[in-house]
Image (cartoon, coloured by chain):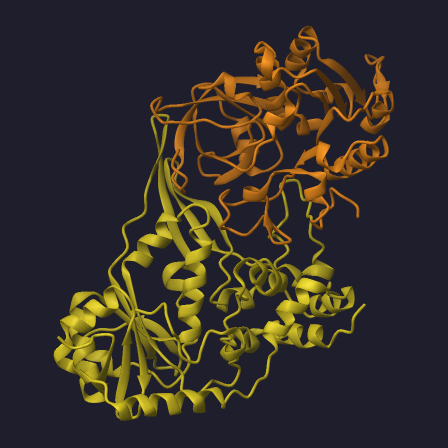
């Protein structure tokens, strides 16, 4: 019996292994499309070679667990009877090539969707998933996962973690399904040697040294527990927030949603859950038009305080994973890194 | 009941018209074996065909189960749709959700209710429950006073309930913002009625109404010597799930649906809300 916790997979064996996995479950991996966009997509038998492990996937895993739109229930009104039916069950899915930040985000979503009631739709998908991550040897331009303790490599949470050692992967198994998978397909792997361990450690140190952005997330989180943010900062940020919701939509940990009915005909319809953004003016507006939030001054307050102040207070960790996607998407330049920079420079009132 | 997104069916047994805008919908679950219980101050997520859901306070006492009252003001799409429904029609409900009023702390207290308009709905559940309890010696409250403000005499809602409360010894004082020829009662804001009320360390005040009213009533009560932990209010916020996930009612690290909607003033002070001026 070999130790299944850590093994080596030669790169020559990657596609054969993925083809086996593809037969067991739906396989989703970052795929570069004809436009050059890298997105998580289901992978067929023949196109495993389209898997793109070089670029950061443009979306996180969020859409697969909390889709932009999903049916929570169907409803019918039949002879006065108003009844609801649950959504279809989730498919068994293996996610491959997931970055550390995005798995960290999923672990945060697990918390959100289980407090205090388990969200059945979310956990149905979660329980039918296995996540295979790929540690980052080279941070992307806007990445700061080191500052949010969500990368470049992970220590837990994954089914399997792959680390690229050049011609081979160093594979670590998490508990449960990941270990079972290694056990089942052990003939693709070989045992870890000392040289592999040394190489992995060396790459880890190199990766940590390559971050170009120094975002002081822990400092901002601690400072937020102690002092308020100057109104001038909120106003400055809000004046360049154009209510597009882009930051919340690309954010792997923004999970706010709306629920609405979509009638199909007079007697039936579906109840749809869709992404919402706390930065938008309609988010807190109540029936009758009253809105407890003044958007012109506080459009971004809720979002940044939730991630950096309140989540830090309740979980000891910010719910920003340093993936950097919101930096690219915000055309007003008022993303979370701008806020952190302004606030950490704020002098004591 | 299942705390998830699948509502349970409920049938409208009766509709009580409270005023031009407000009606009370008396519901009963169609599946009578479904376990359902709640405490005064909790709310339900109400489904109306094709209109999605809205968070609505329960306005009846748990002692009236299996009947559940929802008093609803016609304001938006869903509430307008339910106002168009009739006895025997079906709606969906999920819940109950949220923290209730601390009923166990009300035994032997002098309860002061201050409400404006539809704000009486969640307090009505407490009043009815306390009156029911008053039959049971050890849990009885000392006294109940209600100060109720409406815009005009025509807007006074819950008349049937108020009459019944008066018969049971509740000191009900009403006021309107604008009088008409039929009105010879008090005219003015509900805060003005507070000056004639005796407040002691035994008083527990429960306040609900428009945010601006809550704010002024809390300030007046504090001036009259009511302690922060003796004043309770219930906040109304836009909600989409009722169970702490959707994020809409997030407020300074709290979720109104889980940590509230009932708060005492010392809890309210920690939140940045329009119902309380720091």
Q: Nearer the viewer, residue B164 or A74?
A: B164
User: Seen from this angle, which residue lies furthest top?
Assistant: B167
Q: Residue at x 51, y 47 (%)?
A: B244
Expressed as whole percent of the image width and height from the top left, the position of residue A62 reads 42, 64
Q: Nearer the viewer, residue B136 or B75?
A: B136
Q: Residue at x 72, y 32 (%)?
A: B230
Examine the rendered structure and indicate whether residue A305 appears above or below residue B182.
Answer: below
Give the quarter of the image for residue B148. Answer: top right
Q: Any idea which chain is the yellow one in this picture?
A: A
Expressed as whole percent of the image width and height from the top left, the position of residue A33 reads 34, 79
Seen in the image, is B226 located left or right of residue A134? right
Q: Nearer the viewer, residue B260 or A40?
A: B260
Q: Colour of chain B?
A: orange
Which quarter of the figure is the N terminus of chain A placed in? bottom left
Seen in the image, is A313 located left or right of residue B146? left
Seen in the image, is B37 located left or right of residue A242? left
């Amino acid at each position: 019996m070999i130790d299944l916790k850590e093994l080596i997979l030669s790169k020559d064996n990657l596609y054969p292994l993925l083809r086996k996995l593809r037969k067991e479950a739906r396989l989703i991996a970052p795929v570069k499309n004809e436009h050059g966009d890298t997105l998580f997509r289901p992978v067929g038998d023949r196109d495993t070679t389209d898997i793109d492990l070089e670029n950061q996937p443009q979306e996180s895993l969020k859409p697969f667990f909390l889709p932009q739109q999903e049916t929570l229930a169907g409803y019918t009104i039949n002879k006065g009877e108003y009844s609801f039916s649950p959504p279809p069950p989730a498919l068994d899915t293996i996610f491959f090539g997931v970055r550390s930040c995005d798995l960290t985000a999923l672990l945060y979503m697990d918390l959100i969707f289980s407090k205090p009631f388990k969200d059945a739709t979310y956990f149905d998908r979660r329980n039918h998933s296995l996540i295979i991550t790929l540690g980052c040897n080279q941070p992307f331009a806007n990445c700061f996962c080191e500052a949010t303790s969500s990368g470049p490599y992970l220590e837990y949470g994954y089914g399997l973690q792959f680390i690229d050692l050049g011609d081979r992967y160093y594979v670590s198994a998490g508990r449960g399904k990941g270990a079972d998978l290694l056990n089942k397909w052990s003939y693709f792997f070989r045992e870890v040697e000392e040289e592999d361990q040394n190489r992995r450690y060396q790459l880890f140190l190199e990766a940590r040294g390559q971050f170009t952005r120094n975002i002081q997330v822990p400092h901002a989180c601690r400072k937020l527990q102690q002092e308020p943010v100057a109104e001038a900062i909120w106003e400055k940020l809000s004046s360049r927030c154009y209510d597009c919701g882009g930051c919340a939509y690309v954010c792997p940990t923004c999970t706010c949603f709306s629920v609405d009915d979509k009638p199909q005909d007079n007697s039936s319809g579906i109840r749809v859950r869709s992404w919402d953004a706390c930065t938008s003016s309609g988010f807190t507006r109540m029936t009758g038009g009253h809105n407890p939030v003044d958007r012109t001054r506080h459009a971004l307050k809720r979002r940044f305080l939730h991630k950096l102040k309140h989540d830090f207070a309740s979980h000891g960790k910010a719910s920003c994973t340093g993936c950097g996607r919101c930096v690219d998407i915000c055309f007003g330049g008022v993303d979370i890194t701008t806020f952190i920079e302004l606030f950490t420079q704020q002098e004591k009132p | 009941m299942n705390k998830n997104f699948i509502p349970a069916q409920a049938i409208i047994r009766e509709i009580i018209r409270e005023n031009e805008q407000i009606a009370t919908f008396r519901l009963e679950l169609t599946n009578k074996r479904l376990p359902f219980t709640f405490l005064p101050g909790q709310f339900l997520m109400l489904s109306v065909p094709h209109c999605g859901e809205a968070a609505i306070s329960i306005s009846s006492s748990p002692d009236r189960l299996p009947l559940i009252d929802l008093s609803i003001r016609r304001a938006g799409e869903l509430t307008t749709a339910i106002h168009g429904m009739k006895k025997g029609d079906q709606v969906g409900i999920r819940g109950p959700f949220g923290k209730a009023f601390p009923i166990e702390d009300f035994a032997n207290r002098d309860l002061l209710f201050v409400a404006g308009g539809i704000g009486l709905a969640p307090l009505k559940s407490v009043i009815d429950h306390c009156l029911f309890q008053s039959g049971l010696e050890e849990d009885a409250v000392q006294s109940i006073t209600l100060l109720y403000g409406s815009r005009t005499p025509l807007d006074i809602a819950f008349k049937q309930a108020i009459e019944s409360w008066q018969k049971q010894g509740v000191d009900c004082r009403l006021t309107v913002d604008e009088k008409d020829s039929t009105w010879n009662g008090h005219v003015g804001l509900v805060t003005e009625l507070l000056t004639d009320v005796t407040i002691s360390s035994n008083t527990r005040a429960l306040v609900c109404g428009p945010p601006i009213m809550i704010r002024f009533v809390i300030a007046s009560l504090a001036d009259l010597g009511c302690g922060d932990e003796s004043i309770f209010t219930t906040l109304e916020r836009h909600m989409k799930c009722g169970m702490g996930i959707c994020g809409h009612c997030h407020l300074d690290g709290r979720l109104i649906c889980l940590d509230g909607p009932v708060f005492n003033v010392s809890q309210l002070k920690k939140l940045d809300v329009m119902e309380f001026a720091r």
